[in-house]
Amino acid sequence: MFPGLPQLGYPEVEPIVLDEVHISLGGGPDGYKAQFRDVAAKGVSALRITGLRTRITDDEVQLQLALHIPKIRAAAKYRSNGVKAKVFIRAKPFLVEGHKYLRLQQLKMDFSVENIKMGVENVHDGNTILQAALNLFINSNSQELLKEMKPDLRRKLVQVMTSFVEKLFAQVPYDAWIID
């Protein structure tokens, strides 16, 4: 367990849990569809901020962060290396009892994965030949599979990050973020 920010309601940083992720390749009876539930990802706490751009005016704060996560492992038998992400945050300052805070207006993100390995287990009553064939197909086409999963993953990650940033902004005053 990695220590989190208990004072902000995050007793631990990991795992990050995504309730559901869908993938759909092709259509009709020959199409491939998969659904992953309760995906628990670990490794995000090792992220490094590799770039930061800001635009600050009296009525708005914009932050763009470039992040690098060396490795993510998920309970859904998925492994990735070299995750790079960009996060764009737009917020507006507001006053509460004489103290200035930020209110999140918009959060966008995009990410890329350098190397990805996925696999399935317990295929069709333990059919190891089918399992090996599926895993070979999945890993031979992992970037294409990721491309199909990316919109759903991005949507879920934005939800998780939005909740985190909103709590952070509600409890950490403006002056702790921005030094005039």
Image (cartoon, helix red, strand yellow):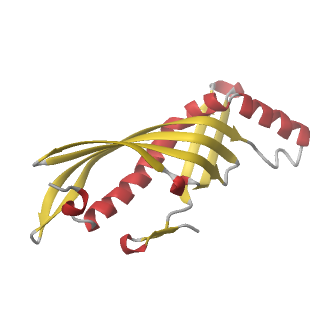
Q: Which x, y percent locates residue 139?
A: 73, 33
Q: Is residue 32 left or right of residue 123?
A: left
Q: Which x, y percent locates residue 97?
A: 11, 72
Task: Classify the position of the C terminus by image quarter.
Answer: bottom left
Quadrant of the rendered structure where residue 164 is? bottom left
Image: 128 above or below 137: below
Q: Is residue 114 left or right of residue 5?
A: right
Q: Nearer the viewer, residue 18 or 177?
A: 177
Q: Which x, y percent locates residue 147?
A: 56, 31
At 24% from the left edge and 62% from the top edge, which residue is drawn?
176
Image: 4 above or below 33: below
Residue reaching furthest bottom?
Answer: 7
At 17% from the left edge and 45% from the top edge, which residue is drawn?
56
Q: Nearer the viewer, residue 63 or 128?
A: 63
At 84% from the left edge and 40% from the top edge, which residue is drawn?
131
Task: Classify the position of the N terminus by image quarter.
Answer: bottom right
Image: 36 above or below 141: below
Q: How many marks?
A: 0
Q: Is residue 131 left or right of residue 12?
A: right
Q: Nearer the viewer, residue 28 or 95?
A: 95
At 52% from the left edge and 57% from the top edge, which residue is drawn?
45
Q: Which x, y percent locates residue 140?
A: 73, 28
Q: Nearer the viewer, residue 88 or 49?
A: 49
